[in-house]
Amino acid sequence: MSKKKLICIVCPNGCEIEIDGDKISGYTCKRGLDYAKSEFLNPVRSLSSTVKIADSDLVCPVKTSKPIPKGKMFEVIKEINKVSIKKPIKYHQIIIKNVLNLGVDIIATKEF
Ligand code: SF4
């Protein structure tokens, strides 16, 4: 395993955490340690994008209902880009259910 540094984003202190092999240092609380482990072993991110609205020039902003594995971001964006939805669109309406079987939905973040 190689040495890796990251800034903890769990709270505004922004501690610099270093991971060197199986040694983790620089965190000042358990939340920071948990964040570092998660970020190193299975980094996840929330994703925001837009979906075309059929028969219009408009797009609807969407996001993932939960963070997804960082390595799946581009595949999920491809799935989102395949979709076109019709009005009316409700806030938090599910646009894609269980995208790529990740256990996460793509939901609308605006009404149209
Ligand atoms: S390690 Fe703890 S104190 Fe430091 S930024 Fe993370 S959560 Fe905040």
Image: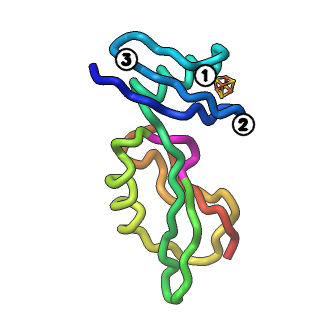
Q: Which residues are magenta?
A: 64-68
CA distance separating discs 1 and 3: 16 Å
Left or right of 27 on screen, residue 102: left
- Tell me the amino acid under the disc marked 2: Pro
Residue 63 % position (x, y): 56, 56
Secondary-structure class at tag 1: helix
The residue carrying mark 1 is 32
Which numbered tag is attached to residue 12?
Answer: 2
The residue carrying mark 3 is 20
Sequence-wise, the earlier of marks 2 and 3 is 2
CA distance separating discs 2 and 3: 24 Å
On whether residue 61 falls in the magenta region, the answer is: no
Q: Main secondary structure of the magenta part?
A: loop
Number of residues whose C-alpha sits closer than 10 Å to that of mark 3, classed few (under 14), some (14–19) or many (20 or more): few
Beta carbon of the mark 1 residue lies under 8 A of ligand 1: yes
Beta carbon of the mark 2 residue lies under 8 A of ligand 1: yes
